[in-house]
Amino acid sequence: MACMARIVFTQQLRRFTETPELSAPVATLRAALDAAFALNPRLRGYVLDEQGHMRGNVVAFIDGRRCMDRVRLADALAPDSEVYVLQALSGG
Amino acid sequence: MEQRAWIATRKGLFEMRRNHGRWAVERVHFLGEPVSMVLPPLASGRMLAALNLGHFGVKVQASDDAGAGWHELPAPAYPPQPEGEPVAGVAWKLQQIWSLEAARDTIWAGTLPGGLFRSADGAESWQLVEPLWMQPGRAEWFGGGYDVPGIHSICPHPTRASEVLVGISCGGAWVTRDNGANWQLQADGMHAAYMPPDQAENPNTQDPHRIVRCAAQPDVLWCQHHNGIWRSADNAVSWQEVTNVPLANFGFAVAVHPVQADTAWFVPGVADQQRVPVDGALVVNRTRDGGRSFETLRTGLPHENCYDLIYRHGLAVDETGHRLLMGSTTGGLWASDDGGDRWATVAPHLPPIYAVRFG
């Protein structure tokens, strides 16, 4: 579809819950995430904490650029943006 | 007699069975995932596992058939954090479920960063116990072992339904007698060697590493504290230090006999700045006279080159008071059938063990 942001979640999440891959007419990162959470409400708790902030070890990339606003998630999306929600690398 | 136990580890939940006198791993649940705490099956059949997924947060899994099948339930969640909330550095965000206990129709969850949650519907939903969370004294709490404070011990009173004691690192011991509406700080008698001298007696900054209550004599509580062992015989009105502990009085775990309140077990480590067994030999200190004397039990435990640490929930005694299980942060698991006199290695190479529980 034209002029729709595309949102992709890490496959690692599929161990725990469904991860919809979707395109949506959204203007911000938060709106993009909300569109995904509407399809699978359980996904919200895996990506955001109870204050609505991005979890410390989750990262989002918008068109290859790492999202820095982890609280408001107000980063703007272009009509054809690609958003990847990934796990940060950590642990052992 | 067949018996079951659960071992929560950094890389899964291990279900143990004791058959013909030997413990063995029966099944592994959530292999690869950190399981911070487990609540064995209740009378209703429900059991809980608290997962602490490194990237994706704290999750609660429930089973109604003793682990044959699991399903996710909502995790406890802190309410929206008010603007300018005064306790510096503590976000209202669930970091870990550190303790789970059930009494009557209530399940209690103690968490990092210090909130106590309750569920009246078998963990289908949780409510933050706000009177404790909103205590002005919470501003004095600080982390012990973690960056934020946490509730590691929950001791419901076995006969008084409205009474619960919780132990907090570092925030002392708090008691409610009206089902959570009001809370009293009850750590008088403890002292903190890690605080400035004029603050050492402050009950609100004590670091009780673990508190357990005798089921049959509930006025008796035992505490392995950051810098010693304390006992209360008056339901936490006062605490008396136990001073003649062999080898070392540092440690994390304590277990109390379910009937004989004067019998308790501890696992010493050298000191807080060196958290390993004394002389590289794992031992258990047992008292059977309320702390007046101890026996150091080492038969069947590693005698040399052992650096296993038994963390807060790594030592458990069953309802008979005879059988013990002990699991270490380097993945060793040992069992005793005779109150700690003799031990046998159950599994030497499990993942780091967070909690051991019978049931």
Image (cartoon, coloured by chain):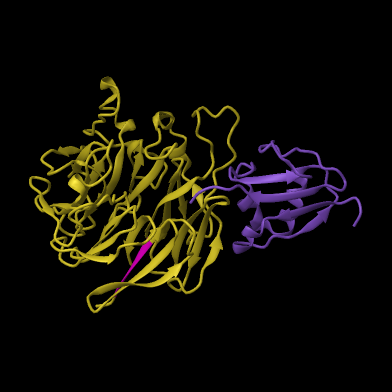
Chain colours: A purple, B yellow
Which quadrant of the structure image shows residue B351? bottom left
Which quadrant of the figure contains the N terminus of chain B?
bottom left
Q: Nearer the viewer, residue B205 or A60?
A: A60
Instruction: Answer whether residue A72 is visible to the viewer in this image.
Output: yes
The structure residue drawn at horizontal position 47% and vertical position 62%, both measured from the top left corner, is: B122
Q: Residue furthest top?
A: B198
Q: Nearer the viewer, residue A20 or B153?
A: A20
Expressed as whole percent of the image width and height from the top left, the position of residue B292 reads 8, 45
Q: Residue furthest right?
A: A2
Q: Is residue B134 shown left or right of residue B336?
A: right
Q: Is residue A18 magenta?
A: no
Which quadrant of the figure contains the C terminus of chain B?
bottom left
Which quadrant of the structure image shows residue B317? bottom left
- Asked if B329 appears above or below B224 in the picture, the reply is below
- Asked if B231 appears above or below B258 in the picture, the reply is above
Q: Nearer the viewer, residue A25 or B179?
A: A25
Instruction: Answer whether residue B45 is visible to the viewer in this image.
Output: no
**Magenta region's main secondary structure?**
strand
* Number of numbered tags placed on the structure image: 0
Expressed as whole percent of the image width and height from the top left, the position of residue B239 reads 20, 38
The structure residue drawn at horizontal position 76% and vertical position 49%, both measured from the top left corner, is: A83
Q: Which residues are magenta?
A: B3-7
Expressed as whole percent of the image width and height from the top left, the position of residue B148 reads 44, 37
Expressed as whole percent of the image width and height from the top left, the position of residue B329 reads 34, 52
